[in-house]
Amino acid sequence: MPFTLATWNINSVRLREPIVQKLLREEAPDILCLQECKSPVEKIPTEGFAALGYPHIVARGQKGYNGVAMLSKLPIEDVGDRDFAGLGHARHIAARLENGVVIHNFYVPAGGDVPDREVNEKFGQKLDYLTEMRDWFHTEAPRKSILVGDLNIAPREDDVWSHKQLLKVVSHTPVEVAQLAETQDAGGWVDITRKDIPDGQLYSWWSYRARDWDAADKGRRLDHVWATPDIANAGHSSRILRDARGWEKPSDHAPVFATFDL
C-alpha cells in the first residue's frame, strides 16, 4: 500500500498548531514527522490532530526545546529512541508500520555559530552525534527503513544559495558534509529527495533574519528523506512545500514530502 510521509521542523508544535493542522487538511500525508516540537509529550495538542484523522502518535519531548514526534493515519508501533552523543536531548524516535517498515525521525544538533569544536562545544556535539549515528548504522545494518528529519546539514553545492559563501558557515562546512556522507554511507542510505530531483538548487530552510525570504531566496536544504537500498526504488514524488514558509506565523523550515509504494 503506498503511503506519503512528510518531515517538518515545526519550531514549536504548540505555537504552530494552526499551520500543522493546515498541512494535515490540505496535503494529507499519511505520516507527518515533526522536529523541534519544544513541548513535553503530554502537552502536544494531539486532540486536534486526531480529529483530522491522525490518531496515532509516537513522540519524545522536552520543555522548551528539541523534541520529535510522528503523527500518523496508519497504525505505528513505537520501537524506541537513542540518545546519540549522550546529550540527554529528545532528538530521535523510531516507529514501525504494519508492513514492517521502520521510520527514524531525527533532529541533529544545529552546531552553534562557529565551526570549531575547540571554541564551540555545540559544534563538537554535532560532530559527535553524527559519529554515533554512523557507528550505529554500521553495527545495525538497517533494512527496510526510512530516515527523515532536520539533519542540519546541506551537503551538496546546489543545496545552498552560495557554496562559496557558505563554506565556513555551520551547516555547509567541509567537515560537516564529510561527516554526513560517512553517516549516510554507513547505512547505505539513499537520498530520496535528490534521487527524484537530481539537478538544481533545492532548499527547505530560509532564515527568519531575511526581510523578504522569498525574494532573497538564500536557502539551504537541511531537511532530508533517506531510505535503505532495499526499498529506495519504491520512493518517488519528492517535493518541498515552499509555500508553507510563507504561511502565517511560519516555521523557518518547509515540509519535505516523499511517497513510497510499499
Image (cartoon, rainbow, N blue to C red):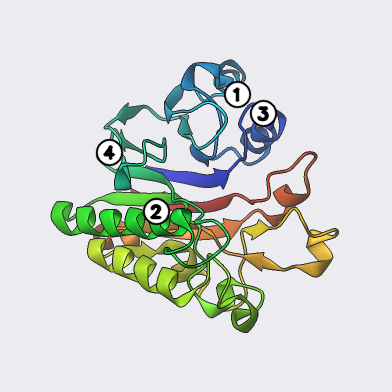
Mark 2 vs 3, N-terminal side? 3
Residue at position x 58%, y 60% from top? Answer: 113
| Left/right of residue 46 with respect to residue 143 in the rendered view | right
Q: Residue furthest front?
A: 119
Mark 4 is surrounded, within 10 Å at the Cα level, by few (under 14), some (14 to 19) or many (20 or more) other residues, namely few
Q: Quadrant of residue 166?
A: bottom right
110 sits to left or right of 139: right
**120 w.r.t. 9: above or below:** below
Q: CA distance from mark 2 to mark 3?
A: 30 Å
Sequence-wise, the earlier of marks 2 and 1 is: 1
Residue at figure coordinates x 57%, y 64% from the top left = 221
Residue tagged by mark 3? 17
Cα distance in 3D space between marks 4 and 2: 35 Å
User: Is residue 70 visible in this depiction of the protein?
Assistant: yes
Viewer-side residue, 63 vs 4: 63
What is the spatial separation of the Cα atoms under label 2 and label 1, in whole angstroms? 38 Å
Please say if the residues under marks 4 and 1 sit with CB atoms less than 8 Å apart: no
Local SS, label 4: loop
**Mark 3 or 1, closer to the camera:** 3
Residue type indicated by callout 2: Gln
Residue at the spot of label 4: 99
Which residue is under mark 2? 125
Give the image location of residue 24, x and y in percent.
62, 34
Q: Which mark is residue 52?
A: 1
Task: Please say if 18 is above or below 130.
Answer: above
Provide residue 226's location: percent of width, then percent of height. Answer: 39, 58
Left or right of 113 on screen, residue 259: left
